[in-house]
Amino acid sequence: MPFRSTRTLIALMVLAGNSAILADDAPSFFSKFQFHANVSQGFLFSSDNNYLTTDSSDGSAKWTEAALSLSRPITDKLRAGVQVHSYSLGQLGRQRVTLDWAYADYKLSRYFGVRAGKVKTPTGLYNDVQDIDAVYQWVLLPQGMYPADLKGFLLSHEGGIVYGEVSPSKKFGSIEYQGFGGLRSQSRVEGFATTMAEQGVQLGTDSGPMAGADVRWRTGLEGLMLGASYVHTDLSAPDSKAGPYPFPIETIYSMKHVYAQYERGKMVLSGEWRTNPLWLTIGPYPQRYTPNRAWYAMATYRVASKLSMGSYFEDSLCFLSGGRDRTDPLNYQKDLAVNGRYDFNRYLYLKLEGHYMQGVLWGFYSLDNPNGYQKDTRLVAARVGFTI
């Protein structure tokens, strides 16, 4: 959502806190703000295939990202926050300043709270922290579940969330729940619009209702967390065009996640499985059903106070190219990643990662691979970031 389209929402947030502002003197008021910022620069170098719309086969530094967030408690139970974001990844993002999220959060008790505005969508282990590069280990999260070219679309939605936590007993652990709904919109400078452009279709306004839930059980076994998410989304782009002709697009999909994480000492083990069937109608063509599933297993270990290492393996399958040929590289992707992260201090960090990918299902575009694809891709990815 462009920043200028959020004026009404921000005005409502200001009005909500107006009484508190008037009650506080200026020094006390400003001292309660929490300010965070993150700036990062990425680098991609790959064999043969270009990746994520960059010229990565020649080495590319066309990956810059910055985010600025501000939040403040208004009362003991009410809090408000906002984050603006800008990024450029190859031909995506184009360094536009957009609103990641802007919310008012009222927490009645640990059992029940409400958050409204443009809010993060809580699915899986990483979806609602994709905008905070500094908090996770990886340069690139598993792309079958957390695609860098669709991050803005998946990160948040306009609407609300109800949430809470219950703890039947210490032995049982606790259950955290979140139910959400609202409106989700595709960006014209992200991956789906780029894919449509490759097919000669100019994507119009693509948005629609969504609803879902996320439940996490922090078990009585210390360090073990189990969870599940569900989202249903119905998108419509009635003003899309193929040349001068109307070419409406409708997309219906449901996303089911199950996930687990176990932390013990310096080690963290994680895994997720997701199925995401699509029903896609493009122009005058009949609706097409596309199965889609992905899973990964991940491990990280803190070698020293400033150095951590990790690895994951991901396996994805989606019949986007038509047919049901599991040997077609366009229909699958397997990714083995090995990673290291070094934190120079609390502000500055460096990530270095190697990937061996088989198949070209996610993140590969014909616009920067005009001669076709090689089946396998070796990729080195690096990112240096500064956070406060």
Image: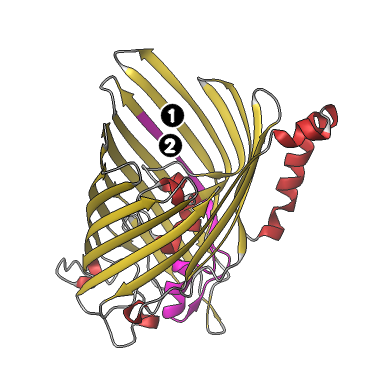
Q: Secondary structure at mark 1?
A: strand
Q: Is residue 366 above or below residue 180?
A: below
- Point out residue 155 in the picture as x, y percentages from the top left corner: 48, 51
- Point out residue 130 in the picture as x, y percentages from the top left corner: 45, 51
Amino acid found under the numbered disc labelled 1: Tyr
**In the depicted view, which residue is nearer to us: 362 or 261?**
261
Quadrant that contains the N terminus: bottom right
**In the depicted view, which residue is nearer to us: 165 or 57?**
57
Discs 2, 1 touching: Cβ within 8 Å:
yes
Q: Quadrant of residue 117?
A: top right
The disc at residue 177 is 1
Residue at the location (71% across, 30% down)? 74
Which colour assignment does the render follow? Answer: secondary structure
Crowdedness near tag 2: few (<14), some (14–19) or many (≥20) residues, C-alpha within 10 Å? many
Residue at the location (34% across, 55% down)? 141
Q: Secondary structure at mark 2?
A: strand
Distance, label 2 to label 1, CA atoms, is 7 Å
Magenta residues, start to end:
187-216
Residue at the location (39% across, 72% down)? 285
Determine which residue is flagged by label 2. Answer: 213
- Point out residue 62 in the picture as x, y percentages from the top left corner: 46, 73
- Single out the residue that lies furthest toward the bottom: 371
- Single out the residue that lies furthest toward the left: 327
Q: Is residue 146 above or below residue 42?
A: above
Ranked by sequence position, the earlier of labels 2 and 1 is 1
Amino acid found under the numbered disc labelled 2: Ala
Q: Is residue 166 inside the magenta stretch?
A: no
The disc at residue 260 is none
- Point out residue 258 in the picture as x, y percentages from the top left corner: 29, 40
